[in-house]
Amino acid sequence: MGDGNGAMFTKAIARRPGRSVAEGITAHPELGRPDYETALRQHDAYVAALGRCGLSVEVLPALEEFPDSCFVEDVAVCAPDLAVVTAPAASSRAGETGGVAELLARHYARVERIEAPGTLEGGDVMMVGKIFYVGLSARTNRAGFSRFAALFESAGYGAIAVPMPPTLHLKTGLSYLEDGWLLVDAGFAAHEEFRDFNRIMVDPAERYAANCVRVNEHVLVPAGYPKTLAAIRAAGLDPIELEMSEFRKIDGGLSCLSLRF
Ligand code: CIR
């Protein structure tokens, strides 16, 4: 599965967390509120890790009016020859797409948009070679999927809708690590569409680690999940561990913090 080169990137876009990151949406209030200074340090380390993977990273300034805006992955989907600005379903996040089309137009000849009544967030989109798996989550609806599929079909890609377990985004529970390897949370264990991958099942005690990111020769892995780390090493992949405690408190994973292309 996969052509093994889908994770070759040269550029990334990230956005600094603002002080308002403490007000980000969360389904896990028991974890507490993010600490701004710690979030900034963790974000700096994340950007440095992308640099170590060989990417040049553009770091956008914080947007205080949007507490979740450091999760830039949700506002666009970037393929080699087409970028699509999404339509976040969370009302506090809808305005995050402002200026994103203009930003991407500096890198892409073709930039398109998901339009209302469609909603779609980039965290629901997992690219495997020329196929996109798209989670039909509380954030991504059928109309959003249909528009997404039509746009990418016109550019030579396929799109497959995936029914969701009770999980925020598709990539909260699945990460394609290239070379056929797929990290899988238990919520996706029974999904037929993922049976033919080399599946690495994430231990139920390490569910947050189901969101990792393959970036060129490395895999970004959240720190503190030793079983997942060992499984990634056993697959012959080269992990970089990153502290993510503050983003985890507002349901953000490693993939959410950048657009890679
Ligand atoms: C949200 O609920 O929208 C944010 N607190 C977390 C977004 C995480 N993004 C992602 O998984 N791609």
Image: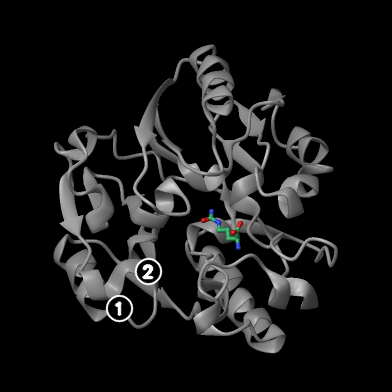
Whether residue 83 is visible here, answered yes or no, is yes
Whether residue 261 is visible here, answered yes or no, is no
Amino acid of disc 1: Tyr
Q: Position of residue 1 (x, y in %)?
A: 21, 34
Q: CA distance from mark 1 to mark 2?
A: 8 Å
In the image, 177: left or right of 230?
A: right
Label 1: which residue? 225
At x 72%, y 52%, the residue is 93
* Contact flag, marks 1 and 2 (Cβ < 8 Å): yes
Mark 1 or 2: the one toward you: 2
The quadrant where residue 5 appears: top left
In the image, 86: left or right of 168?
A: right
Label 2: which residue? 208
Name the quarter showing ligand 1: bottom right
Residue 170 vs residue 50, the one in the foreground: 170
Q: Position of residue 88 (x, y in %)?
A: 66, 43
Q: Quadrant of the C terminus?
A: top right
At x 67%, y 27%, the residue is 114
The quadrant where residue 68 appears: bottom right
In the image, 70: left or right of 217?
A: right
In the image, 195: left or right of 61?
A: left
